[in-house]
Amino acid sequence: MKAMVVEKFRAPLVRKDLPEPQLRNPNDVIVKVVACGVCHTDLHAAHGDWPVKPKLPLIPGHEGVGVIEKVGKLVTHLKTGDRVGVPWLHSADGLCPSCLAGWETLCPNQQMTGYSVDGSYAEKVVADARYVGRIPEGLDFAEVSPHFCAGVTTYKAVKLGGAAPDKTVLISGIGGLGHMALQYAKVAGARTIAVDVEEHALALAKNLGADEVLSARSQDVGKAAQKLGGADVVVATAVSTGSFRSSFDALKPGGKLVIVGLPPEEMPVPVFDLVLKGISIIGSIVGTRKDLDETLDLAARGLVKCNVKVEPMDAVNDIFDRMEAGKIDGRVVMQIA
Amino acid sequence: MKAMVVEKFRAPLVRKDLPEPQLRNPNDVIVKVVACGVCHTDLHAAHGDWPVKPKLPLIPGHEGVGVIEKVGKLVTHLKTGDRVGVPWLHSADGLCPSCLAGWETLCPNQQMTGYSVDGSYAEKVVADARYVGRIPEGLDFAEVSPHFCAGVTTYKAVKLGGAAPDKTVLISGIGGLGHMALQYAKVAGARTIAVDVEEHALALAKNLGADEVLSARSQDVGKAAQKLGGADVVVATAVSTGSFRSSFDALKPGGKLVIVGLPPEEMPVPVFDLVLKGISIIGSIVGTRKDLDETLDLAARGLVKCNVKVEPMDAVNDIFDRMEAGKIDGRVVMQIA
Amino acid sequence: MKAMVVEKFRAPLVRKDLPEPQLRNPNDVIVKVVACGVCHTDLHAAHGDWPVKPKLPLIPGHEGVGVIEKVGKLVTHLKTGDRVGVPWLHSADGLCPSCLAGWETLCPNQQMTGYSVDGSYAEKVVADARYVGRIPEGLDFAEVSPHFCAGVTTYKAVKLGGAAPDKTVLISGIGGLGHMALQYAKVAGARTIAVDVEEHALALAKNLGADEVLSARSQDVGKAAQKLGGADVVVATAVSTGSFRSSFDALKPGGKLVIVGLPPEEMPVPVFDLVLKGISIIGSIVGTRKDLDETLDLAARGLVKCNVKVEPMDAVNDIFDRMEAGKIDGRVVMQIA
Amino acid sequence: MKAMVVEKFRAPLVRKDLPEPQLRNPNDVIVKVVACGVCHTDLHAAHGDWPVKPKLPLIPGHEGVGVIEKVGKLVTHLKTGDRVGVPWLHSADGLCPSCLAGWETLCPNQQMTGYSVDGSYAEKVVADARYVGRIPEGLDFAEVSPHFCAGVTTYKAVKLGGAAPDKTVLISGIGGLGHMALQYAKVAGARTIAVDVEEHALALAKNLGADEVLSARSQDVGKAAQKLGGADVVVATAVSTGSFRSSFDALKPGGKLVIVGLPPEEMPVPVFDLVLKGISIIGSIVGTRKDLDETLDLAARGLVKCNVKVEPMDAVNDIFDRMEAGKIDGRVVMQIA
């Protein structure tokens, strides 16, 4: 099968013809990949940016969607021909306290698709049937692909923040993640404030129904948000030291700052204000299978869409270049079959 | 009446003979003060350490306990002779979203006893009857005094952290605040880990029933706590950059770091780990009237005690000197009547 | 002033010319009433249906809206000319555990407008300023009136049930309460199922965007709802023994049945199923001041509207007759000024 | 192997010599049973009392504890020789919304040990390795056995009720379940009220540290509990129509009535009071694997013990007779190996 492979960090991905993946155990399925979104995390993986390194050589990709081709002997809830996606959380041990509490995303024994095991920048991928997401009828493969990471990640953050009709939610960064976070906040009935440095991002936010938009280029976002009454929840998708602080300053007393970005650097927290205002800073990583099912249900109900640009798999190195240069709006999805 | 007064920042308090305080409105009461604990916050107030300065001249003191001498016309739930304490939260507006949600401690219009209004380093104090705490029968004035700040503050933090029989709670710093936090965690059924740099503090923790004690002087507390299985909750009473980080590192996936200290400096947060491990960092300030009533109930049930040393009010400058030098264990309470 | 008065139970209300109400204490305001909705509870009050009887003679009405004419000396957050509504919860003690927890609706010392104290079927009403709701700009008096009871009551029930984008909420009874509950569930992002016996009520539900409608006349609602996947939450507005059981049977495992109706009779609960399916049955009464502010905010944002028919105050006995005969859809509001 | 078998409903169990159970799939383990508690549910199973009937012939028993003898190929977290217990929840599908939310006890595809599959009234039992509980070191087999049902069931109910240091928990029925519920409530710091009709049960409650005991024989429990301030939570272990009502009447405003018993009959709920007082009635069935681990941890920490009487397996019919006659206090455990 054809696959795009990271052979060494910070080098271009190489197109290879590899043997097809096999069932490793009776809970596995083989998925014929139709499309796969390109996530910033893939770029970090290909660069070896983070403390824990991915496997090498690596097939990246954790937004792969397609059709089941083969099922292991213990798989009864899925069958050949079913449409599924293979998310970041490849598998978990199912038995640790986190797993037993419905927080498999925090399992210390998890495997990560396109990181610790091969992913979906390939014509076939092997997955643990218990951790794939079933794609509801009527959804297009390329369009649903980013819901498996960008979607579920921001859905979870918005949910964790407690978005609701009585809450104001500020979304910091209206890119691939943020434009979905904004929609999830709106679906939950929240009043929304969208923040970005780019005018076109703010225009997108307006189109998506943001109640207020604030340009982080032209004003102090913390103060501007306070003039609007402040935010109960901030979902911070693009975390820099500056945006972190203005997100913090935008919060009402008792507010929650939910972070989904993964910056390598530390952020200085004003503890005095944190205590006096009763603020919480909360880290949130992807979402559980339940979150994923809920995300896909919202997509199927037509309530949340991802802005998608479809390109061929061969374009991956070019896509990575543009992503690194900050030139991508929304999400690029590679058509694979 | 006699009072100890801050006339200018960083100068010794001055003993003055002042006119007695009067009822300012029909919700007020006048309390004859019997005892008042000395809190680190009083030292910060007397030094003008924090961004928002206290009134000057100032009578400090927010752990004052005594007997009601006079009641305003709208006060029906209290009468002359009732035993009460006057806590940090002097009053709140009762109408803002925080107040309406049972979070009056976050009210933007609050007054703070011994800070924005005069406190209990005096023979009499005026209080808003709706915000005083009623002292249950059988409790000694001097012994109950610190429950009005050190007690309720740590009780709230432990409660906010979610201490319960299935949780491990690490208390960082076993001083005036921490030795009470430890007891609250135990009362809630949690497994407890006590951390301090001082051997005598760790010995106290052992006496109070800590399941484990860790010396922050002789080991990496984060690693040592992880060897014990990690903490679901850390209550950080004495926050320095170093202890903040080791508290963070001690957490299990999904863990909560609750901060009650008020350091002027910022703390660097490792955002990557915060997100990957799903950690929350939560600021917690004193406690509400409900928290205070619960705190006093636990004292009345004999489940939580404060280590108290009683001294005369004239000793206040000497007490401040010892506090600044870190020479005080537990809580000093001044006998006033 | 003119007022419609209950002089004895089950007799027609009498139009009287009464002295204007006076400020009783410095927290009071006098409100010039512009409009007042007619609630089923008023009918129960006028009939003396419930165990605890209202005062007699009684001016009913707890959806009165109007303009402040006079303010007591301690009132600083409201002034003459402000637009407010006077809800069912006339006042509470502000000091009991329920009040301190933000649950003043459960206060044992509460007064109820139009029940234990006079209400707004009159040209003037006296209210406790701390418990009135401020009407946002741009809202019409008559249209906003029912939000003070029908609105806040169903909003609270929907919130208590946990309506959210991942939940299915079934509304049992699409009348004055139910058609608002349906809108609140939709605002919170829930999938909705509307149940009623009347075709026109189901048509209204469809117009309001219900995902599914079920006629309780032509089918077993429990079974029909289970075919649709079941309900996470049922909000039961019209509670009869039959509808109670079918609401119960409509629930998913772990589901919640929230009851807002006040039937005098007891309902048989199938405890075996309750335990096996992990069901909760939850009573919910009106809403707190915070809930009321949130309700009014949703009205101001144009997200929830009440179907209102405006009639003169003199029509009250006729309105009562039609209400008793079940001939009223939505809400009748009496124009008073 | 020897086993006690239900061959037909309401007939005595028959001692049989049966072939040993085999691994059915690679997630299974075979457990050599050392001891097994006798639960009321076993009696209901043997009588075919409930709407859904158990398999026939049936080996009852869902408190079996013992040693693993054989492990399936996919089992990596357990090995031969490990000490485990096989609880009521034999297995669940692991994929339904309830399972994914950490509520596998509500899984519609669950199997129940000693009910839909054979249990531990036998020398060997086959179990799904993913659903057994690991017995901590130092715990005696017979003593720990009831923690696998009576323990975890009441632990879950107490936890669901929200027992905490600021809550008063009333335990209705101080038998095999109730005397454990009482201990869990105390461990969580709650003030406790114990209710029973039998003097010896109340004496046991006193010994276990109940703050108050109330005889349901000599007084109106609802009123008596209200005199003590009322209960935030009632855990109802023995549910009859009368005890249900007095439990309900014992609640404070906003209180929760958690039911763990499984009476076949319906209970009349006073809906008017339910709504006015904001009461919740909550069904609770056994506990999840996480709850079970927590229960066993509390046993290992020596905080909760079960009163156990050990008898031989041959005595089972006699034990059933005494249980039916209400002559058993605490828990009878059969020694099997």
Image: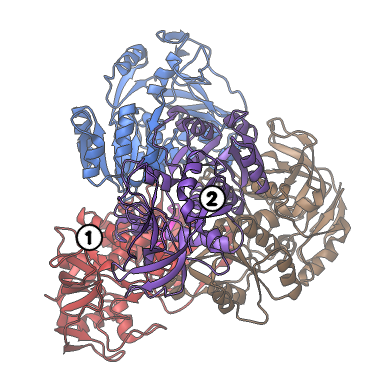
Chain colours: A purple, B blue, C brown, D red
- Number of marks in picture: 2
Can residue D143 be seen here? The reply is: yes
Which region shows up in magenta? D228-238
Answer few, some or many: residues within 10 Å of disc 1's Cα (few below 14, many 20 plus, some between 14 and 19): some
Q: Quadrant of residue C267?
A: bottom right
Up-down: is A29 above or below A91? below
C-alpha span from label 1 to label 2: 57 Å
Asked whether C181 falls inside the magenta stretch, the response is no
Identify residue type, mark 2.
Arg
Image point 49% across, 15% down: which residue?
Answer: B58
Could you tell me which quadrant the C terminus of chain B lies in? Answer: top left
Please state the chain letter of the residue tagged with numbered disc 1 in the rendered image. Answer: D
The amino acid at mark 1 is Lys
Residue D234 on the magenta segment: yes
Residue C279 coordinates in the image, percent (x, y): 47, 67
Which x, y percent locates residue B9? 45, 10
Residue linked to disc 1: D305
Mark 2: secondary structure: strand
> Disc 2 is attached to a residue of which chain?
A
Residue receiving disc 2: A331
A259 relative to D251, above or below: above
Q: Nearer the viewer, residue D320 or A169?
A: A169
Describe residue D27's horizontal placement relative to residue D334 as left or right. Answer: right
Quadrant of res C77 = top right
Image height of D183 relative to D108, above or below: above
Determine whether the residue tagged by mark 1 lies in a helix, strand or loop: loop
